[in-house]
Image: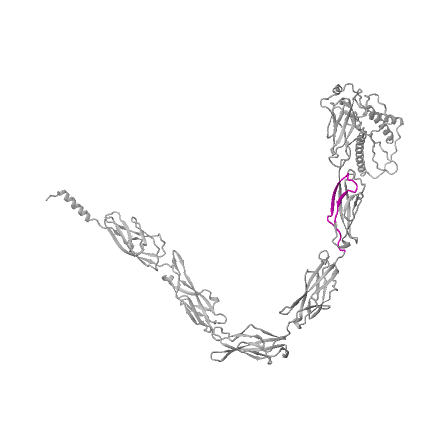
Amino acid sequence: MKRVPRAALALGLLRLCLAQANFAPYFFDNGVGSTHGNMALFSLPEDTSVGSHVYTLNGTDPEGDPVSYHISFDPSTRSIFSVDANCGNVTLVEELDREREDEIEAIISISDSLNQVAEKVVILVTDANDEAPSFIQEPYVILVPEDTPAGSSIFKVHAVDRDTGSGGSVTYFLQNPHSTKFAMDRHSGVLRLRAGTTLDYEKARAHFVTVVAKDGGGRLRGADVVFSATTTITVSVEDVQDTAPVFVGTPYYGYVYEDTLPGSEVLTVVAMDGDRGKPNHILYGLVNGSDGAFEINETSGAISVMQSPAQLRREVYELHIQVTEVGSEGHPGDHAMVSVIIRVVDLNNHPPTFYGENGPQDRFELSMFEHPPQGEILRGLKITVNDSDQGANAKFNLRLVGPGGIFRVVPQTVLNEAQVTIIVENSAAIDFETSKVLTFKLLAVEVNTPEKFSSTADVVIQLLDTNDNVPEFTSHYYVARIPENAPGSSNVVAVTAVDPDTGPWGEVKYSIYGPEANLFLIHPSTGIIYTQPGASLDAETTARYNFYVKAEDLEGRYSLAEVFVTLLDVNDHYPQFGQNIQEKTMVLGTPLKIEATDQDAEEPNNLVDYSITHAEPANVFEIDARTGEIRLKNFIHSLDALHNITAGGDGTWSLEVQAKDRGSPSFSTTALLRIEITDTEALSRGPMATFLMQTKDNPMKAVGVLAGIMAIVVAITVLISTATFWRNKKSNKVLPVRRVLRRRPSPTPRTLRIEWLKFRKAKAAAKFVLKEDAPNENCNNNRLGSSLPPRAPAPPPPPRVVPTMGTAHWTVPTVSGSLAPQQPQRSPKPKALGSSVQSALVSELKQKFEKKSVDNKAYF
């Protein structure tokens, strides 16, 4: 045997001792209500939410080793909790329900990896108010006799709530306690008939009572809640014999007609037991009022007439009928009475009928003129209507069926028989042109009979035409256009008028009138307007004509229309030059304008184009085709250049100019023009000379300009004099009222006046003395230059007026005159081509002022 070393043996013994000294872990027992420990006496509410941390397992190991926790359940039960092995936190993983499971058994364990200690624990599930009351033995249907006394208990309901405590207690009450005949005991659930109320099968055979069961309330998930449940009790009312018979369909009326046979049933009365649930048998009887004329069947209630209508002595019978209940033993019970009214009436067997002069008739015809007077009676219609029945059966209404509002019928209500009258209501609607035949139906309908018998008759009215329409033109205005060269009798326009009348009244006759209708005629039947034979139309004289046409019928009824005729211009005029075109004077550098006029009325016939058809030499002048301005060629700037082109000329050039219109065909006119050309330097000696040269060809222009200047001067003088007058008048108003007489001063010696006048005349005339230049061969003596006219001389001051002894008249001194040039009586012969124009103007102005000075001697 091998010997074990001593050291090894000692080590083994040491290990064995250490293993035997390792103690098991254990749970802490923290007591009731603790959430840390071994779950002893632990309880949990059933409404705890899944996933909640509900407990913490807590234990320790004596050696201080780490411990782990575990929880397990019986395999046949649910795993309600889970635990964290390290920290011992217990979590709810399944919902709790105390009513299904009020205790939970579990095995919890703690382990230190060597030793494991397990304990069986019981977790109590506490109640929460999570259940609602529930009625048992539903549905509730009960049968209650209608004679049950008030306050009687008729039924008991029972509801169960599985909760404990207040949540499991149940109380009862009615959902609508004020609208029902019943009351409920809140604790026992007993249903009673309310005091002071009764049941009535005849009024209500069933009642529906809603009962509410409510628990006492409790906590659920942190809140106070109350649960309730409802159920319906059907109370069927059982009928008992307590109501008299009742007649159905009252009141009762019956009729016996003239053809009713004896034994015929007139009407049937119906009655039934008022107790509908268990009705008794009933019998009918006739008490009185029949006089032997009527009988009633005791079981069916049918009333029959036993005599013929001719034997009935009264028109109205009131019968008293009694109905009686018969019980199961055959004894009579409750009874009831009712009255039955039976009338003996005529049989409505005749409808209304229309009659003419020869008997019954259903068609009436009449011819009449259109538009009769309103209210007129159609006397050609002889209509009678009759109903052979008597009383109410013979009453009927009359009306016309057809176009409304044209006629009305009289009378509208008839009893037995009446003469029918038709009256015109709307005369305008009776129009032959609208409708030649008017058709109506005359309708008679009974009023108060169930049969409503009726009859109809056709009324046909043939309308005769009258002349009630005026011819109407198709248009109020007619517009026509014809060329001005249209020959006589040319058609212009056709007018049309329509008269809806027939025969001669519908024939229209046309006529024409107006101050501008002299050149036109109209066909009386066709309405064609044409020009007078041989009429000469001229658009340049009258371009538009306006006149009227009249459409007239046989009796003179007429209407008017207006006609507008426009003449279309035709190019029938040649352009015409002015009278003074033969000789013209042109200032070098200034264009010369010629003008031709075309008398045509419209464009382009009256538009004129200008051209130079012949000139010698051909390269001197050019003309603007639109304006007619003649200019020298651009390269000619002086008379010397002009003389170089036309050497040997006398300063006068001849042109052949043409004016041509734009019409089609086009017309033209040619004129020979003589032009004198002067240089602007020759007219630069003074403005008057320039003006006279410009107005040489138009002397009236010079007269007008000078007259205008003189008028301006006179107007200024009048204004100054008027202002002076009003100023003196205003100043005199503030002076004392007195008259100052002055003697007229002795007149100035005549010799002094004459000298002064000569001096003034010389001074005024000197203003118009123009410095003459040397004669110019190219200057035209008959034409003025383009300078402005000279200013008019200032008028002499007014003489001082000395007041006389007579009445003082306020007068405004004025100076009047005219600077219009006058043609001298003797025209001086021109000395040469260069004679001065200024000298002629100065001499003329001297003569005018000498004459004016003589006329104004009264001022000096």
Nearest the viewer among 232 and 126 is: 232
**Residue at x 40% of width, y 58% of height:** 224
**Residue 691 % position (x, y):** 78, 27
Position of the C terminus, as image quadrant, is top right
Q: Nearer the viewer, residue 148 or 122?
A: 148
Number of marks drawn: 0
Residue positioned most to the left:
1
In magenta segment, residue 468: yes
Up-down: is 720 above or below 115? Answer: above
Residue 193 position, x and y percent, is: 45, 70
On screen, residue 711 versus residue 215, left or right, reads right
Foreground: 63 or 374?
Answer: 374
Query: Is residue 446 rendered to the left or right of residue 590?
Result: left
Percent coordinates x, y for residue 402 in the rendering: 68, 61
Q: Is residue 223 visible?
A: yes
Quadrant of the rendered image containing residue 30: bottom left
The image shows residue 732, relative to residue 277, as above or below, that is above
Front in this rendered view, residue 565 or 12: 565
Task: Write the start and end of the magenta stretch as one range.
Answer: 467-496
The x and y percentages for residue 264 are 58, 76
